[in-house]
Amino acid sequence: MNYKLLLSAAVVLLIAACSKTSTVEPSGKDSKVVPGVQAPDLTKDPASFTPQQTGVTFRKVNNPKGITGYVLQIPATYNTETTKRWPVIIFLHGVGERGNDLNMVKRAGLAAIAAKNANFPFIVISPQCPLGTWWNVPSLNAVYDDIVKLYNIDPKKIYVTGLSMGGFGTWEWVAAYPSRFAAAVPICGAGPVAKACALKTKPIWAFHNADDPTVNVSGSRNMVNAIKACGGQLVKYTENPTGGHDAWTKAYNNPALFTWLSAQRLP
């Protein structure tokens, strides 16, 4: 099936089915937007380290191209490990978390897991897609360009993952800019098969449930098979026989996924 047609056909079902959230509740301290500040160049002066509020905060995007804000998860030891360059996971949510309330984003998927673990060993960036729109690469690149300037990150260890609509976005973004990511984890999505060969040397771990009624499992199968047909040997695929649309809860609660991610690094 044509990728664009598949995406269009899935939208109605996605609106109803991909907004499953965790029970993490919004708190007062998370409800205000914290403006970003320019990060120092630590190679020049380690003493110029700028502390960040640890835990969950909301941030605005500088020079936005559609996406205006994101949920930021900073590990508890960020301000004491002042010379450390942290790995980063960019998480793309599903249809149900679109809008202008970042509390919705932090209650779903990986953003919710990070919010419950002060020692989650990654900086997690969870942008919010505006209501009535879909993830698009220029808007996501604006977020990427922002975060590499603002935080003490390891530019060789930036990862992208997403569920449902975010799975579509993950495939699309990493296929368009593979050199920006050390690895990708698309979940219950579909991607541009015509661009699959751009991913033949990219570590990817895809997840889908065979009985998914919202985004057909062929979306993941076709991308994985296309990458392998191009000679790709770094793609992994986990397909569960049951579970419906929610393939993300099991994936994000698997410690092996984050062990694998931590081992991936750009050359």
Image (spheres, rainbow, N blue to C red):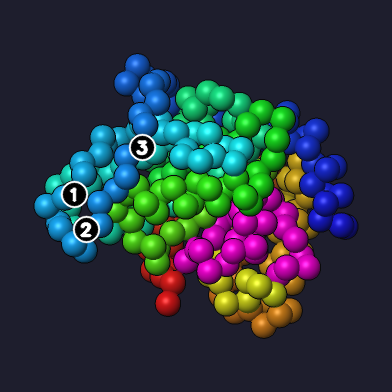
Q: Dot 3 surroundings within 10 Å: few (below 14), some, or many (20 or more)?
A: some
Of residues 254 and 24, which is closer to you in this image? 24
Between the residue at mark 2 and the residue at mark 3, the CA separation in whole angstroms equals: 17 Å
Looking at this view, name the residue that lies furthest to the left: 47
Residue 182 visible to an observer of this rendering? yes
Image point 11% across, 52% down: which residue?
Answer: 47
- The residue at which mark 1 appears reads as 49
Query: Where residue 39 sits: x, y (%)?
Result: 29, 48
Residue annotated with mark 2: 42
Quarter of the image with the C terminus in it: bottom left
Using residue 88 as the reference point, say whether residue 67 is left or right of it: right
**Which labelled disc corresponds to residue 36?**
3
Residue 86: % across, % down: 31, 56
Answer whether residue 167 is visible to the viewer in this image. no
* Residue type beneath disc 3: Gly
Q: Is residue 119 above or below residue 180?
A: above
Instruction: Give the side of residue 8 with respect to residue 151, left or right.
Output: right
Task: Reply yes or no: does residue 183 show up in magenta.
Answer: yes
Residue type pointed to by label 2 = Leu
Please, what is the three-letter code of the amino acid marked with disc 1?
Phe
Q: Element under label 2?
A: loop
Badge 2 or badge 3: first in the primary sequence:
3
Q: Give the SS element for disc 1.
A: loop
- Position of residue 190 relative to residue 249, above or below, is below
Circle 2 crowding by C-alpha within 10 Å: few under 14, some 14–19, many from 20: some
Q: Position of residue 266 (x, y in %)?
A: 44, 72
- Left or right: 129 as drawn, with respect to 215: left
Between 49 and 198, the one lying in front of the other is 49
Local secondary structure at mark 3:
loop
Viewer-side residue, 118 vs 149: 149
